[in-house]
Image (tube, rainbow, N blue to C red):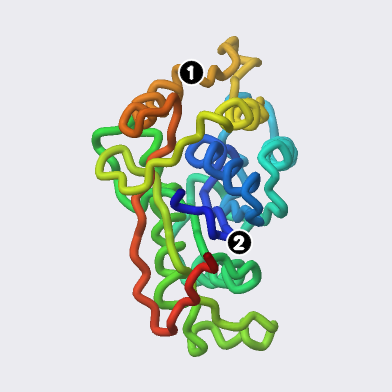
Amino acid sequence: MYFKDYRKVLVVFAHPDDAEGQFGGTIARLVRQGAEVNYVCCTDGSRGGTDPSMTDAELTAIRAAEQRAAADLLGVKEVTYLGRKNGTLEVTTDLRRDIVREIRRHKPELILTLSPFRVLDAPIGLSHADHMNAAEATLIAVYPEADSPRAYPELLDEGFEPHSVNDVWIPAVNGADRIIDVTDTVEVKARAWLCHKSQAGAKTGKPAWSFEPRMGARMRAAGAKIGVAFAESFRNIEITSSVPAPSPQV
């Protein structure tokens, strides 16, 4: 399988719940095969709820707890928050530097992140501006910044040496070149996804989130392409590094 040799994986995303929805089955598979997986969430999630009476601080704390619970179900080791206000994420030098710091800290071979461009043949929610900006900042952080000793010299002073990433995967509706069988992990993905109860809108009378209408059909369609029940689809971005990346050990 595509990821059998990855030992360290970093997942960089915009909001609490993005990782489970886009990558949950693949993350669970990676963990089960022995990879260490860590999260970087770019925003605080404070504008993602449906209860207008709740303060930003209250919702931020709730969403952090929900994210930790979901990460625990999938076997994720660490969740780092970069603290930006969601709905305002921009591709700034400060954001790129913060992502570079986490890349150098965790030294991943594989990064999973969101799509850096608007996907017109998918539901508009997948093309949230925060998603695109988190992904674009991550791609710039991967190359040319994370492995350049001249990028952010202050990080060298903090002890974070340059690091080369082998691969980056982004979700793909069409044009996927990595279709991952997650039939054995789809149940834990669903349970992790449902940890994000604050997004259900219970106080406004909306029903709790249901896994099937939101992503089940899409995962079954991906699975049909490789003859399995459920799959997650990605596009691999080739990394052209200024420093040769180490080959995975076979």
The image position of residue 55, as x and y in percent, is 69, 36
Q: Residue at x 60, y 70 (%)?
A: 107
Question: Which-is-in-front pick, marks 2 and 1?
Answer: 2
Residue 212 bears which disc, if any?
1
Report crowding for label 1: few under 14, some 14 to 19, many 20 or more residues within 10 A (C-alpha): few
Q: Mark 2 points at which residue?
A: 8
In-front residue for pair 58/154: 154
- Determine the residue positioned at 31% across, 50% down: 117
Disc 2 on helix, strand or loop?
A: strand
The single residue placed furthest to the front in the displayed view is 250
Kind of residue indicated by mark 2: Lys
- Residue type, label 1: Glu
Measured as percent of width and height from the top left, residue 123 is found at 34, 30
The residue at the point 61 percent across, 41 percent down is 28
Name the residue nearer the viewer: 75 or 250: 250
Q: Residue at x 56, y 12 (%)?
A: 206
Q: Horizontal and vertical percent for residue 80?
A: 67, 56
Judge the density around disc 2: few (<14), some (14-19), many (≥20) Cα neighbours within 10 Å: some
First of labels 2, 1 by sequence position: 2
**Whole-percent x, y for residue 167 in the image:** 43, 63
